[in-house]
Image: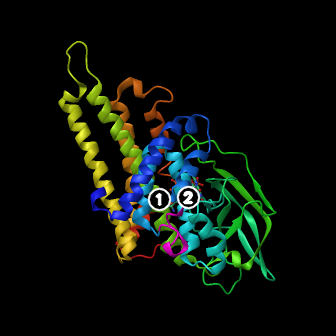
Amino acid sequence: MDEFLPSELQALLATARAVAEETLLPEADSVDRDCLWPAAGLQALAATGLAGLTVPSRLGGLGQRLLGLVALTEVLGQSCASTAMCYAMHCVATAVIAAKATRFHEEHYLRPIAAGRHLTTLALSETGTGAHFFLPQTRLEPRGDSFAVNGTKQFVTNGGQADSYVVSTTAGSETAEGDFSCVVVDRDTPGMSWGAPWRGLGMRGNASRSLTLENVVLPRHHLLGREGDQAWYVFEVITPYFALAMAGTYLGVAGAALEAAVQHLKTRRYAHSGQAVAEIEVLQHRIGQLWTGWQKTRLLVYHAARLGDLGDPSALTAILACKADAANTAVTLVNEAMTLCGGMAYRENSTLSRLLRDARAAHVMSPTTDMLTVWTGRTVLGLPLL
Ligand SMILES: Cc1cc2nc3c(=O)[nH]c(=O)nc-3n(C[C@H](O)[C@H](O)[C@H](O)COP(=O)(O)OP(=O)(O)OC[C@H]3O[C@@H](n4cnc5c(N)ncnc54)[C@H](O)[C@@H]3O)c2cc1C
């Protein structure tokens, strides 16, 4: 697929592959086993300039949008899904900041992100509304020249590690058009407190934690866009970037599992017959099916990203559909790969067992598979999404 990508993106992918090979892959097992937040991997990505992936070029960033995000997260997800997710959440939050950045946002967040000096992340999900990530209950209340923020976020990736948090809230005032705003909260702002680290089945290095905001006072310029920018933020910025970052990550996980299965079939040979497992026709058939499913999903994901970057009116349907499809493909493919790789793959802490546990998060990561599939149907039927 690389040969169809713009040359500047191919160069970024070469850089990402080098970081993945030198830093992410060697650390992937310990990140998973010990629930380690992948500091070295994220630092290596920042050192090569890749932390500024979604920062506009005029601010020193790489100026990439959905296609670049998919391609990079796929490469990283192939080596370490936890690092890919931490990086993905940083890039998505950066895109949200960049979408309607003021001078303050540019100088305080986007330039330092491009320089690899600032990690940001996305804090949307809440216990009360769960998969309905577009319905925050965290309150934003005007207090003179400031806002007070009150509420609790769940599952914040890079929790306690990032320098800033893009937090979704209700609208600040009743005159706002919708009931969804976003603010940026700097780390250690008084009133922030963190829950205990959350231990997942997979994605174990992502440092997910809950975040409570109790009377967190923010100057008004920490607001992103306008108060109550609901539909615009949710469907023009957050959903496309969030969905494609996750689709890329899980395409990578699926690709790693396929590669493991191919290697096993090619290298395992039976003593009694001298036959390589790859010579068994039914297994050739199964690998053929897996490759076809993976490539079909890749084509849909990359197509959706291109349509999104072009601003094509049909982009949203493809974007909604492709993340659900990537989740289905990842879970199915890794599961099948484990069968193809036999008993050794089933051992505790095998690479495939990590990939299987990582893949399993794909369905419940927002936007979730069921929500996306319903939304895909609604856009096809010409019905409103909400
Ligand atoms: C590893 C990991 C990292 C995460 N990182 C972040 C992060 O950095 N930032 C962040 O904001 N969030 C993050 N999340 C949260 C995630 O994005 C989801 O919001 C969350 O997992 C879903 O909420 P819930 O667990 O309360 O599910 P529930 O709301 O309890 O949903 C349960 C199931 O019901 C389905 N469902 C619910 N309503 C509908 C409906 N109307 N139609 C169809 N199906 C429906 C859902 O799809 C889901 O499968 C993370 C989650 C995980 C597992």
What residue is shown with label 2? 89
Name above or below for residue 190 compared with residue 326: below
Q: Position of residue 268 (x, y in %)?
A: 29, 24
Front one among 162 and 320:
162
Residue shown at the point (63%, 41%) measured from the top left: 199
Amino acid at dot 2: Met
Disc number placed over residue 245 in the picture, else none = 1
Q: Position of residue 145 (x, y in %)?
A: 79, 82
* Res. 297 visible in picture: yes
Q: Is residue 24 above or below residue 69?
A: above
Q: Is residue 319 above or below residue 349?
A: below
Mark 2 Cα-neighbour bin, 10 Å: few <14, some 14–19, many ≥20: many
Packing grade of label 1 (10 A; few <14, some 14-19, many >=20) is many
Left or right for 153, reference 25: right
| Residue 56 lies within the magenta run | yes
Tag 1, which secondary structure?
Answer: helix
Q: Quadrant of the N terminus?
A: bottom left
Marks 2 and 1, the one that precedes in the sequence:
2
The verdict on label 2 being within 8 Å of ligand 1 is yes
| Frontmost residue, 221 versus 11 | 11
The image quadrant of residue 273 is top left
Q: Name which quarter of the figure residue 99 lies in.
A: bottom right
User: Disc 2, disc 1: CB below 8 Å?
Assistant: yes
The reply to whether the residue tagged 1 has its Cβ within 8 angstroms of ligand 1 is: no
Residue 289 locus on image (x, y percent): 25, 43
User: Vertical placement of 292 versus 98: above or below?
Assistant: above
The magenta region covers 52-62
Question: At 39% from the left edge and 23% from the top edge, which residue is drawn?
Answer: 343
Residue 240 lies, in percent from the top left, at 46, 67
Give the side of residue 193 with respect to residue 265, left or right. right
Question: Label 1 is placed on what type of residue?
Answer: Ala
Residue 327 visible within the image: no
